[in-house]
Amino acid sequence: MPKKSPQTGKSSARLPRQNQAIHLDAVASEYLKELITFSRVANQGYAICICNTPKFREDLISTLAEKLKQDGIGVYQVKLAPKEQSLGKRIRILLESEKFLQFKKTHQKVLLSITGLDDTIQDDEREFKKRPVALQGINQQRDYLRTLPMSLLIWVPEWLAQRLPEFAPDFWVAKSVVFECFSATEVMSQSLSQLSGVEIEFENVDEAKRKMRIYEKLIKVSEDKSTRARSLQYLSILHRQLGNYTKAEKCCLQSLKIFP
């Protein structure tokens, strides 16, 4: 069962941090490019952004806000409170607030960045023996969310993202895109902790494919030979577990070329 997130008090909407230099690694920079492209192109719809580390998530949001400011796009941050179980209601109230209307006037385009959905899942719902009230809500509100006159970034940790197809299927299907935002260090440490013998744990094929895409990205952008070699090894293991033996062998041989 996932650990309970610390409570953060009342719901709040806040502006992004200003004038803060943040260093992003090569993998994070790739995520940032994808987020910027979506933010510039999309005028409606919502993206589900999977990120496990609050600090890494906040760095991405802050850097995104700084980059988009050059295009006249404002990133308005919304933090859901633990007892706030209706995202749709929260947004309806927000759109009529004086603070948001003033923010909107100063930007050519506005993007909502929403965090805290995982905090709205109550203690007795966290084993997912029943559908959490908050997920019932977003499942019913998916048409409202995707037809708002602005795009949304909805940030969730991986454990919640894995539950969305089952417990909020309409919301999951109606998404515009999924961004998987994991730092290189996080991905490698997760793999090391999960590795047992020559197996990598995953609950279903979709989760395995998500891991594969991350390793492929690490191989592509990392300048560290050890990271590339290890990513190829993990990719080889996953291919083998999925029955892709030719691809598994190819990845293994590529890894050996880096470190014989």
Image (spheres, rainbow, N blue to C red):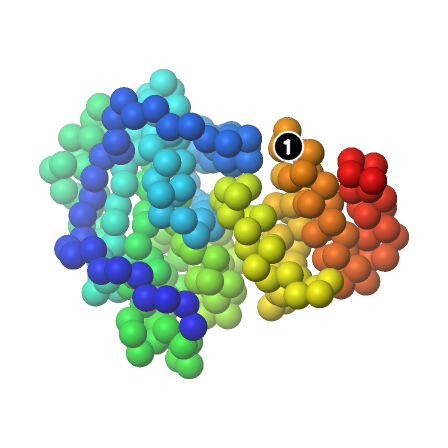
Location of mark 1 (residue): 224
Residue 163 shown left or right of residue 201 in the figure: left
Measured from the top left, where is residue 179 in percent x and y? 51, 45
- Residue 198, compared with residue 69, is above or below; it is below
Tell me the amino acid under the disc marked 1.
Asp
Residue 150 location, quadrant: top left
Measured from the top left, where is residue 139 in percent x and y? 40, 64
Residue 124 shown left or right of residue 106 in the figure: right
- Residue 31, compared with residue 205, is above or below; it is above
Closer to us: 202 or 103:
202
Residue displayed at 42% across by 81% down: 129
Residue 60 shown left or right of residue 217 in the figure: left
Closer to us: 32 or 103:
32
Residue 17 shows in the view? yes
Quadrant where the C terminus is found in the figure: top right
- Residue 33, compared with residue 5, is above or below; it is above
Residue displayed at 31% across by 61% down: 5
Q: What crowding class fits label 1: few (fewer than 14 Cα within 10 Å), some (14-19), or many (20 or more)?
A: few
Residue 126 shown left or right of residue 101 in the figure: right
Quadrant where the N terminus is found in the figure: bottom left
Residue 168 location, quadrant: bottom left
Measured from the top left, where is residue 115 in percent x and y? 32, 50
Residue displayed at 27% across by 41% down: 77
Residue 150 shows in the view? no
Q: Secondary structure at mark 1?
A: loop
Q: Residue furthest front?
A: 260
